[in-house]
């Protein structure tokens, strides 16, 4: 999705699409909305090409976040955990 001059990519594990996770103790909610995350369904490995082209990336789910860490796009210290679900954002500065 293109927003102004940014290329926004949203990636999530298929099994959490449409679900909401909440950590009441920390006041956090993570909603994996279909309207935001549903789009082109690709194999996890193929999502790398979208991350490479994006300027803003939103990643949710164990498989997707793990791949982004393994490929060096994000650091494990930059992961926010909500009810056992990892979430990370990547913003590329130009």
Image (tube, grey):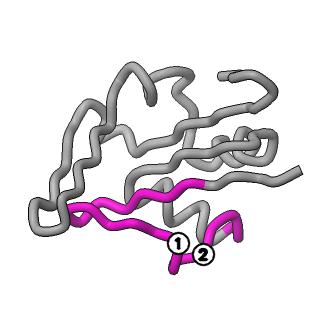
**4 or 44, which lies in front?**
4
SS class of the residue under badge 1? helix
Per the image, the residue denoted by label 2 is 75
Report the span colored magenta.
Answer: 71-89
Of all residues, the one furthest to the bottom in this rendering is 77
Residue at x-position 60% and y-position 75%: 75
Q: CA distance from mark 1 to mark 2?
A: 5 Å
Residue 33 magenta: no
Quarter location, residue 47: top right
Residue drawn 70% across and 48% down? 48
Q: Is residue 87 left or right of residue 75?
A: left
Q: Is residue 85 left or right of residue 61?
A: left
Cβ atoms at labels 1 and 2 below 8 Å apart: yes
Q: Is residue 4 above or below residue 23?
A: above
Residue 90, percent from left and from top: 64, 55
Which percent across, then down, holds residue 18?
A: 26, 30
According to the picture, the residue beneath numbered tag 1 turns out to be 78
Residue 46, image quadrant: top right
Residue 5 position by quadrant = top right
Q: In percent of the image, x 50 and y 66: which residue is there?
A: 66
Q: Position of residue 29 (x, y in %)?
A: 23, 49
């Amino acid at each position: 999705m293109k927003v102004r001059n940014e290329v926004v990519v949203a990636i999530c594990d298929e099994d959490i699409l449409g679900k909401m996770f909440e950590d009441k103790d920390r006041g956090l909610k993570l909603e994996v909305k279909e309207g935001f995350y549903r789009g082109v369904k690709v194999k996890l490995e193929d999502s790398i090409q979208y991350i490479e082209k994006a300027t803003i990336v939103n990643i949710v789910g164990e498989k997707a976040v793990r791949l982004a860490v393994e490929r060096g796009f994000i650091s494990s210290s930059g992961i926010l955990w909500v009810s056992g679900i990892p979430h990370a954002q990547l913003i590329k500065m130009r």
